[in-house]
Amino acid sequence: MQLLPLSDVINQIKPGMQLPWGVRDATGKLLLARGHLIADAQMLQNLVERGMFVDAVEARTTGAGASGSGAVSTPKEGFAGRWALLQRRLNTLLISPPADLRRLMDEVIGMLITLADTDPDQILFLILRHDQARLQLYGAAHSLHCGAVCCLTAKRMGWTEQRRRSLVGAALTMNIAMIELQGQLALQSRPPTPEQRTEIESHPTRSTKMLRDGGITDPEWLQAVEQHHENPDGAGYPAKLTDIVEAAQMLRHVDIFSAKICARASRPAVFPNQAAREVFTENQGHPLAAALIKEFGVYPPGCFVKLSSGETAIVVRRGSTVTGPQVACLTNSKGEALSKPQLRDTSVKEHAVVSVTPEANVMVRVPWETLYVGS
């Protein structure tokens, strides 16, 4: 069964209408049958946010599309579209874990590794250009970001393919027991309540149990999840261990780093280079933290920079040197928007990067996927 994201055909239905097709989860399981009444806009929004799907064949043979011609939207093509689809599928699996979780997670892991190996620069770009306003979906986005960063960093360190898959699986599922709480915490500006704190501190153990119940038996995957909040100094949780497996240590570094570069209601996002330095310093130069820094570099794809020419640009690819990335200029030296982004090689002196620029200072936005057309 080919599944289409519900968001791709959402223009076919409105509140008060009956569904022209069934609504399904990421496994293809039917949740709402054709003819089910969509009571209000909130119900429709909830279905979209939870990452629901429809059967592509059913969608094509029922109702008319937005154009009125009977055409139905197809899955978004391109790298960014596949990334977005992957996040929606992961969100569904984490919120409502199916009995055959292992098989479905293996598919997600394979999809993510394929994307990461195909174009790691675009992966980093999409992580940094994540829509920070969609805090209610923070849990799935954070899990996907951690999985992608673990994938890239483990490859840099020369881990075997099996160990890399185990680590990615752990990163994607480490918070399965508190995935919805993560969205709540991202939206609230006050500290966690005592009840929330209890749920946070017990989630590594509860997540591990849920994964075992879902058919996951990989010991490295399970150990990494169970220990990903432990600290070598014994100050971690839930067991205050000091002897921690390497995969769990990697996961802890990536988890902290990925949280720092994402905004929450209580604080803004931290610049990636600053976040990497903090993780490196806090972990006393641990080799795993060092590998994380090397993967992102000084000017990772997705960050905004000011050039010596006075132009403002966005990094699209890492360069042959850490200080010479490939960028796309968004404005000229006077701050005026360019009609079309212009690529610059910052290893050339007149286009050298002078500084990182806060996102809030950049008023120009373009469809980011157009920066990679033809690449």
Image: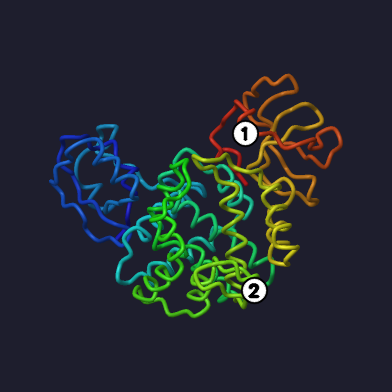
Separation of marks 2 and 1 at Cα, in angstroms: 35 Å
Check residue 159 in the rendering and tell me which mark sits there, or answer none. Answer: 2
Q: Position of residue 37 (x, y in %)?
A: 14, 42
Q: Position of residue 98 (x, y in %)?
A: 30, 67
Depth check, front residue: 126 or 138: 138
Q: Dot 1 lies on which element?
A: helix
Of pointers 2 and 1, the one earlier in the residue sequence: 2
- Tell me which corner region of the image, top left, top right, bottom left or bottom right, holds residue 330: top right
Q: Are marks 2 and 1 in contact (CB under 8 Å)?
A: no
Q: Dot 2 lies on which element?
A: loop
Q: Is residue 350 left or right of residue 290?
A: right
Q: Residue at x 59, y 56 (%)?
A: 256
Q: Position of residue 367 (x, y in %)?
A: 53, 35
CA neighbours of label 2 inside 10 A, class few (<14), some (14 to 19), many (20+): some
Check residue 158 in the rendering and tell me which mark sits there, or answer none. Answer: none
Residue 102's place in the image compared with 136, above or below, is below
- Tell me which corner region of the image, top left, top right, bottom left or bottom right, holds residue 246: bottom right
| Callout count | 2
Residue 74 visible to the viewer: yes
Q: Amino acid at mark 2?
A: Trp
Q: Residue at x 40, y 56 (%)?
A: 179
Quadrant holding the N terminus: bottom left
- Which residue is identified by label 1? 359
